[in-house]
């Protein structure tokens, strides 16, 4: 009996020691049964482990030269939101270690994150990967600081689903300060987005400084008044409105975005939506003797002449301004508009009809294709890729141009079947100027509501495509048109939280996207919005 008790005690002691050993090495083994870390967009692989790491004033950042952008971003974030300044060193215990481990086959932005009880290791398989690993780390930080900054032990292996993941901002209907444009870019970075589509010209104004054609800024950048309320409105105000970004300001924004691995896609919208151009240079329109001013109202399609007329002088003008744009913006994609061009103005203009005949064009649709080809040639001559709204697929194929599909999902299928690479931004899922509640109290564009759940439900890859056609889908973006959004607070209310849903659509594998899981995660994201000082729609009450 005594021998049996000794044997029992020996086994008990061994078992107890094993348990203690597991607890001591908490972060080194043993994934938890339920994943709780609320990371948006959802990573590819996640293992939440036992234990935690504490970030405090004794924590150091260990980095290499190639991670400088990520180091600065993390340091600035910790200082801004947690009043914590970390030192840097070559090595050390209790460190945040950032490194690049080149893997040529890895997708741009792929990374791993390994948090143990004594270190945080962010390894990017390219430079952008380190930055996105930092964004995941940020999402593990507490949203309400009380005491130490504690993050869970975790292992993450992650990469984006699509190469192109972006957001658009219209600064024409309402212009926003450079500092807010930078803030908007930070919102994209926090959601692992890598393209910022900057809509710089339209009927309501020309927002890009032109040194070759200064009348664009003197006459094209300002309108005399603005519509009150939703079109047709209750009248117009009497306030002169406008402005433009200088070359120096735009370059500043380009550099700011590049530090966050975001490429700017600038847009000059032609041959329609050109009233700001015609206000400065009426000779380029179909009614050169008519005085034109940047539009006061929004819905001017087919109501007032806003269409460029073809001529060699006008195409020379376009070559000048697109080259000016490409001198400022070094990114791959240059957007040339091409949407909602009212052909009636070409039909009614004898000079345009002569041009169509002389150039052996079939009709106005042929002229639309001719415009696209001429501008495409300007852009390709600089080694860039032209992007156009999906009206470009309605006419003769223009080699090399990338349609940005906005009108409907069917155009995605049509574009890839025509052989185009495409960027998605279908209006029913991606236009954030639509109300985001059925009982929306805010002034919005008069279109059906685009609820967060609807944004999340979008399937970027339509059924029935071949593997090659699926590969022609580069990714997509959301659009923020600002007809009725005249302040940063109004923009933020409309963008958030839908941008979080959209980020998961284009980053996360479909099998990892779960609506019920996302609904749970978004509650933590709301707390993070509060930390960032963002005004947002929480679907229960209107944030003021």
Image: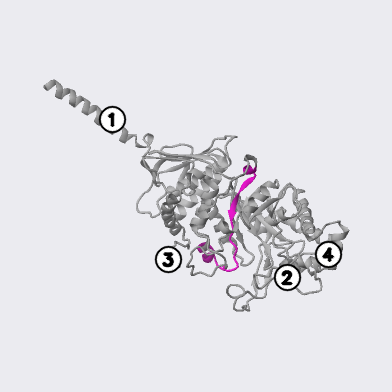
Instruction: Point out the tag, 4 or 1, that comes first from the N-terminus.
Output: 1
Q: In which quarter of the image is residue 467?
A: top right
Query: Left or right of 320: which side holds 452?
Result: left
Segment colored magenta = 469-493
Q: Is mark 2 on a helix, strand or loop?
A: loop
Q: Does the magenta stretch include residue 482?
A: yes
Q: What element carries label 3?
A: loop
Q: Is mark 1 on a helix, strand or loop?
A: helix
> Mark 2 near mark 4, Cβ–Cβ under 8 Å?
no
The residue lying furthest to the right in this view is 358
The residue under label 1 is 18
Q: Residue 352 carries which label?
A: 4
Query: Left or right of 406: which side holds 24?
Result: left
The residue under label 3 is 541
Q: How far apart are marks 4 and 3 (CA)?
A: 54 Å
Viewer-proximal residue among 235 and 393: 393
Can you give x and y, in whole percent of width and height, for residue 140 in the image?
42, 47
| Residue depth check, mark 2 versus mark 1: number of the one nearer the observer | 1
Viewer-proximal residue among 171 and 441: 441
Instruction: Point out the tag, 2 or 1, that comes first from the N-terminus.
Output: 1
The residue under label 2 is 219
Q: How far apart are marks 1 and 3 (CA)?
A: 51 Å
User: Image point 48% across, 52% down: which residue?
Assistant: 77
């Amino acid at each position: 009996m005594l021998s049996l008790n000794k044997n029992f005690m020996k086994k008990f002691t061994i078992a107890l020691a094993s348990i203690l050993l597991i607890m001591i090495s908490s972060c080194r083994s043993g994934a938890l049964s339920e994943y709780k870390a609320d990371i948006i967009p959802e990573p590819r692989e996640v293992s939440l482990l036992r234990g935690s790491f504490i970030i405090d004033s004794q924590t150091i950042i260990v980095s290499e030269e190639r991670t400088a952008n990520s180091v600065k971003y993390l340091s600035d974030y910790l200082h801004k939101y947690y009043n914590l300044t970390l030192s840097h060193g070559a090595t050390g215990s209790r460190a945040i270690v950032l490194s690049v481990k080149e893997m040529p086959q890895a997708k741009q932005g792929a990374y791993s994150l390994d948090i143990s009880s004594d270190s945080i290791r962010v390894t990017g398989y390219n430079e952008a990967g380190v930055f996105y690993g930092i964004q995941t780390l940020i999402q593990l930080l507490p949203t309400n600081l009380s005491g130490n900054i504690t993050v869970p032990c975790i292992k993450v292996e992650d990469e984006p689903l699509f190469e192109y993941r972006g957001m658009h901002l219209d600064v024409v209907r309402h212009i926003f300060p450079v500092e807010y444009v930078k803030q908007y870019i930070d919102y994209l970075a926090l959601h692992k987005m890598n393209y910022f589509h900057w809509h710089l010209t339209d009927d309501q104004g020309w927002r890009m400084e032109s040194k070759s054609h200064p009348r664009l800024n003197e006459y094209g950048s300002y309108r005399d008044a603005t519509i009150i309320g939703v079109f047709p409105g209750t009248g117009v105000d009497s306030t002169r409105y406008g402005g433009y970004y200088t070359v120096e300001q735009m370059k500043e924004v380009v550099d700011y975005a590049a530090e966050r691995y975001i490429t700017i896609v600038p847009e000059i919208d032609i041959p329609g939506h050109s009233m700001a151009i015609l206000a400065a240079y009426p000779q380029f329109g179909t009614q050169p003797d008519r005085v034109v001013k940047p539009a006061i109202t929004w819905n001017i399609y087919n109501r007032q002449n806003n269409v460029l007329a073809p001529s060699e002088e006008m195409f020379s003008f376009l070559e000048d301004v697109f080259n000016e744009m490409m001198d400022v913006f070094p990114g791959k994609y240059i957007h040339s508009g091409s949407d909602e061009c009212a052909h009636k103005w070409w039909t009614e203009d004898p000079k345009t009809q002569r041009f169509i005949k002389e150039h052996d064009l079939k009709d106005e649709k042929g002229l639309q294709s001719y415009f696209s080809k001429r501008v495409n040639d300007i852009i390709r001559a600089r080694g860039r890729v032209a992007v156009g709204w999906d009206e470009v697929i309605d006419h003769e194929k223009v080699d090399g141009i990338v349609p940005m599909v906005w009108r409907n999902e069917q155009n995605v299928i049509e574009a890839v079947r025509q052989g185009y690479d495409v960027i998605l931004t279908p209006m029913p899922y991606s236009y954030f100027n639509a109300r985001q509640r059925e009982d929306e109290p805010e002034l919005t564009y008069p279109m059906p509501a685009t609820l967060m759940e609807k944004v999340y439900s979008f399937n970027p890859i339509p059924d029935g495509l071949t593997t090659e056609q699926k590969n022609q889908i580069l990714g997509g973006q959301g659009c923020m048109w600002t007809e009725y959004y005249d302040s940063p607070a109004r923009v933020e209310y409309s963008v958030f939280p839908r941008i979080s849903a959209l980020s998961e659509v284009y980053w996360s594998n479909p099998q990892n996207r779960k609506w019920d899981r996302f609904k749970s995660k978004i509650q933590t994201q709301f707390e993070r919005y509060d930390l960032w000082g963002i005004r947002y729609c929480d679907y229960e009450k209107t944030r003021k």
